[in-house]
Image (cartoon, coloured by chain):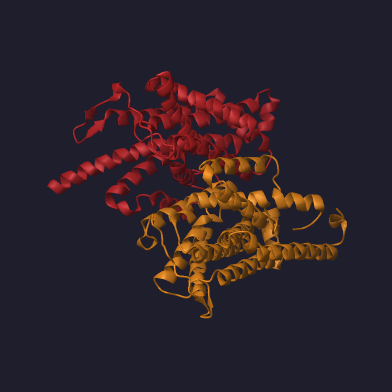
């Protein structure tokens, strides 16, 4: 009886952690998918921007006294602008080249960003307090649910859904999808495609920064936090398939949960389960679960 | 300039001449280096340079960017260290164990990855190598954070004691040169011509009846095996195998070396490896600035000189290197 109680609690606990990680995977892979759709660039710097998002929240608190809620809005905005600048300064120059150069360039940028932060802050983590409005727990009967964690899941879910809605159901999204298909034609209609590309990159990066702010109170703010997560996010994108917005959201959440469950039932492979699933998916469906053939 | 215009046999002759001249220069440098630089530093450089050549075989001649090549390098270094220390094998069999494991991994990883191309391929290799990394963190034989330490060096063929620095240097130099010649032979064989054809125009190669997936897989396995040779040799040189050789950073560095030296040039990866390893060594005191500089070099290479050092020289001097 005792054993069952423990494992049930552990199960819910890991499910929750899985959902939280899934929230981050979903936000990050969504940003990657949005950027890839428009720019045909796999943004290797995505993890770095996620880290910068968390650090921006930390800076805002330390030097401007801005609280969590303000940081939640400001940090994605600031990092998004940085991203837009990055697109203008660097990524635009290689738009006409092989896509591999985009990967190499953003990888280099990631190294620079991460190296600078590591220089300044070492590899240790900085604590970031969770907002006091979300202190405490909900008693949901079968378990205690920390309010902040519930907020992360809900917030991430709504941002993902809003992004999906904006891209698939609005006029701006229609322009975006059209520009993905045929940029020259869309430009001929008088739509400023280069600006749209810059904005798209900024937006994708802002999503990463948002994930960073959400993650700051749960995990510590560390320079290496982006590098740690990027490989898993890549695997998530490969499993979901490039070019599907809803697919990347679903895959993100699902893989987080699966990873959490693995920690309960077979902890030895919890670090690798996402990659194992990726290998299986590649054998069965090389273009990913929701992807189009590339 | 005239090299472009002249007839094909003439061009092949030019190529062989340029390759030979550069090769003699490289051999002379390898022979002279230990008198000026710390020999172990040169040996490590040679191992890493061979690793970069193996990587270049894929990116330069098949057009596949593997962002996880450290999985072969690092795993082979673990296997050869384990074989030498625990199974007490001689250096050559120990290295062969490493090569065999790397090639086998290449077969599996390649079978999974080559069905995709371009960035998709790169992302899959990132993920696969991360999986191998976590495996190495967990598996008992790698000793986790400690790595496999004080690997015995032993005698090659029971004759040459490679715990002697001179013998070890010759041993490593021979392995490097053989590996380098192997790459040269591969890309100048009919097989290599088909690889280049696939790189240039895959649909056309398919329409000509070549079984492209098989060629790509073969190239991937060769590259993995060679990367394994480099890693396995390095384990015997530095007498340890650690997580840093299998980690993601190593995968990124080998990309940097090849990009900086010149993708698709024979000597480019070697030059790139020399520059990157020297940079790490001489800038080590500046800590994480090395990462920043490496990143900046990446960005500069992509934006300013995509041919790389050797590629630019070859281009402006009209040589084929």
Whether residue B180 is visible here, answered yes or no, is yes
Residue most toward the bottom?
B158
Is A15 or B102 nearer to us in this picture? B102
Query: Whole-percent x and y of residue B224?
Result: 55, 62
Q: Which residue shows up at 55% across the image and 35% down it?
A: A35
Classify the position of the C terminus of chain B by image quarter.
bottom right
Q: Which chain is orange?
A: B
Where residue B317 sits in the image (x, y, percent)?
81, 52
Most extreme residue toward the front is B35
Q: Residue at x 69, y 58 (%)?
A: B267
From this view, report whether residue B193 is shown above or below residue B167. Answer: above
Q: Is residue A281 above or below residue A216?
A: below
Q: Which residue is painted at 84% across and 57% down in the image?
A: B3
Q: Position of residue B149 (x, y in %)?
A: 41, 62
The single residue placed furthest to the left in the displayed view is: A1
Would residue B203 appear left or right of A47 to someone viewing this image? right
Residue B208 vs residue B287: left or right?
right
Residues B321 and B200: in front is B321
Q: Nearer the viewer, residue A86 or B274?
A: B274
Q: Closest to the observer: B221 or B159? A: B159
Chain A, colour shown: red
Residue B213 seen in render: no
Give the image quarter of residue B215: bottom right
Horizontal side of residue B26 vs A52, given as left or right:
right
Q: How many marks?
A: 0
Q: Where does the image place residue B43, in percent across and percent down from the top left?
A: 58, 62
């Amino acid at each position: 009886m005792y054993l069952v109680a423990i494992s049930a609690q552990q199960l819910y606990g890991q499910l929750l952690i899985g959902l939280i990680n899934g929230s981050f995977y979903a936000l990050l892979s969504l940003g990657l998918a949005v950027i890839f759709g428009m720019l045909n660039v796999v943004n290797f710097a995505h993890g770095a921007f996620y880290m910068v998002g968390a650090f921006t929240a930390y800076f805002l608190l330390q030097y401007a006294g801005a609280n969590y809620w303000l940081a939640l809005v400001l940090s994605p905005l600031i990092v998004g602008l940085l991203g837009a600048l990055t697109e203008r300064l660097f990524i635009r120059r290689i738009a006409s080249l092989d896509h591999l150069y985009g990967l190499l360039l953003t990888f280099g940028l990631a190294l620079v960003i991460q190296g600078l932060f590591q220089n300044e802050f070492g590899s240790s983590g900085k604590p970031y307090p969770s907002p006091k409005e979300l202190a405490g727990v909900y008693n949901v009967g079968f378990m205690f649910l920390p309010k902040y964690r519930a907020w992360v899941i809900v917030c991430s879910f709504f941002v993902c859904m809003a992004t999906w809605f904006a891209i698939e159901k609005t006029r701006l999204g229609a322009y975006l999808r059209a520009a993905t298909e045929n940029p020259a034609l869309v430009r001929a209609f008088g739509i400023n495609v280069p600006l749209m590309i810059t904005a798209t990159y900024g937006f994708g990066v802002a999503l990463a920064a948002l994930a960073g702010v959400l993650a700051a109170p749960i995990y510590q703010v560390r320079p290496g936090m982006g590098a740690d997560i990027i490989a898993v996010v890549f695997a998530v994108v490969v499993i979901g398939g490039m070019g599907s917005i809803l697919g990347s959201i679903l895959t993100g959440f699902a893989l987080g949960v699966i990873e959490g469950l693995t920690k309960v039932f077979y902890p030895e492979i919890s670090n690798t389960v996402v990659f194992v699933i990726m290998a299986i998916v590649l054998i069965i469906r090389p273009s990913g679960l929701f992807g189009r053939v590339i | 300039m005239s090299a472009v215009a002249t007839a094909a046999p003439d061009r092949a002759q030019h190529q062989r001449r340029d390759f030979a001249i550069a090769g003699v220069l490289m051999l002379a440098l390898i022979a002279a280096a230990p008198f000026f630089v710390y020999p172990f530093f040169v040996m490590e450089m040679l191992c890493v340079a061979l690793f970069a050549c193996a990587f270049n075989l894929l990116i330069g001649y098949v057009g596949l960017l593997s962002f996880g090549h450290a999985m072969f390098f690092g795993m082979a270094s673990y296997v050869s260290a384990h074989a030498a220390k625990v199974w007490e094998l001689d250096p050559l069999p120990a290295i062969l164990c490493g090569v065999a494991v790397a090639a086998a991994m290449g077969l599996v990883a390649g079978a999974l990855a080559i069905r995709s191309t371009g960035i998709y391929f790169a992302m899959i290799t990132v993920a696969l190598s991360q999986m191998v990394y976590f495996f190495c963190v967990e598996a008992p034989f790698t000793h986790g954070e400690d790595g496999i330490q004080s690997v015995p060096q032993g005698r090659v063929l029971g004759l040459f004691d490679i715990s002697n620095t001179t013998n070890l240097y010759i041993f490593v130099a021979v392995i490097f040169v053989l590996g380098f010649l192997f790459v040269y032979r591969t890309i100048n064989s009919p097989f290599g011509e088909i690889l280049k054809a696939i790189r240039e125009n895959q649909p056309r190669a398919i329409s000509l009846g070549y079984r492209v997936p098989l060629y790509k897989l073969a190239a991937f396995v060769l590259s993995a095996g060679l990367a394994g040779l480099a890693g396995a040799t390095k384990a015997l040189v530095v007498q340890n195998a650690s997580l840093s050789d299998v980690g993601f950073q190593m995968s990124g560095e080998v990309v940097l070396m090849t990009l900086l030296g010149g993708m698709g040039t024979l000597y480019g990866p070697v030059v790139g490896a020399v520059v990157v390893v020297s940079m790490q060594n001489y800038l080590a005191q500046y800590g994480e600035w090395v990462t920043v500089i490496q990143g900046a070099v990446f960005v500069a290479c992509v934006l300013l000189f995509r041919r790389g050092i050797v590629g630019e020289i070859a281009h402006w001097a009209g040589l084929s290197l």
